[in-house]
Amino acid sequence: MGLFRPYERSEEAAEPTSTDAGAAPQAAQPAKKDAPTPSRKEAEAARRERLHPSLTPAQQRKADRQAQAAARQRSFVEADNEPGRVLMRDFIDSRKGFAQWSMPALMISLAVSLALVYVNTQLATIAAFLPYVVIFAIIGDLFLMWAGYKKLHAQRLPRVPLKGLLAYGINRSINFRRFRVPAARVKPGDEI
């Protein structure tokens, strides 16, 4: 085979077989369409529907709820990653405070004061002040927590404002350690 010579075929390939002859005319014909070609307006409408499907009201409400939940989750993550909140979380999680036991202590003190009503009324009168003692102990613990945090905050983050951190710290302090969200990164007693 030369460079400029026409393609040379062998004689065997040149003779079509009977099966090839019947298949060639069918393959050469264009396939018939089932429907007419859509107009430009119809094609654009179909494309818009694929990109932005029209939903039923129930589907739209469900999609809106999912979008709102995702946006809320993103805002929680952004707020939880602020440096003041991160420092507050680590500070509270490293403390061994009384405030995290506030709910059980209040429930037990109320149960004791109510149970003593049936045993001895004089003891019940004295025990009625027990829940107040627990509340004052919680307030004292939260006061000490806030004073300690303000000192740490002034050292580590002097230019970050304290706005909103007291409420965040109280909310995190009164929860059990295992129920805190986000989960604790430091152990009680660790230095931060």
Image (cartoon, rainbow, N blue to C red):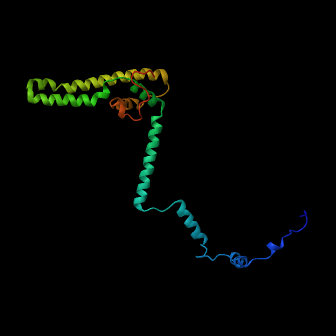
Across and down, in percent, residue 122 comes to 9, 23
Across and down, in percent, residue 167 comes to 37, 31
Image-based side of 118 in relation to 191, left or right:
left
Looking at the image, residue 45 lies above or below residue 80: below
| Residue under the point 45% across and 50% down | 67
Image-based side of 189 in relation to 41, left or right:
left
Between residue 26 and residue 34, name the one nearer to us: 26
Q: Say which quarter of the image contains residue 110.
A: top left
Looking at the image, residue 140 lies above or below residue 78: above
Q: Say which quarter of the image contains residue 168.
A: top left
Image-based side of 57 in relation to 19, left or right:
left
Q: Which image quadrant: the N terminus? A: bottom right
Across and down, in percent, residue 118 comes to 9, 30
Between residue 133 and residue 37, name the one nearer to us: 37
Across and down, in percent, residue 109 comes to 20, 28
Q: Say which quarter of the image contains residue 33.
A: bottom right
Looking at the image, residue 126 lies above or below residue 30: above
Looking at the image, residue 119 lies above or below residue 2: above
| Residue under the point 48% across and 62% down | 54
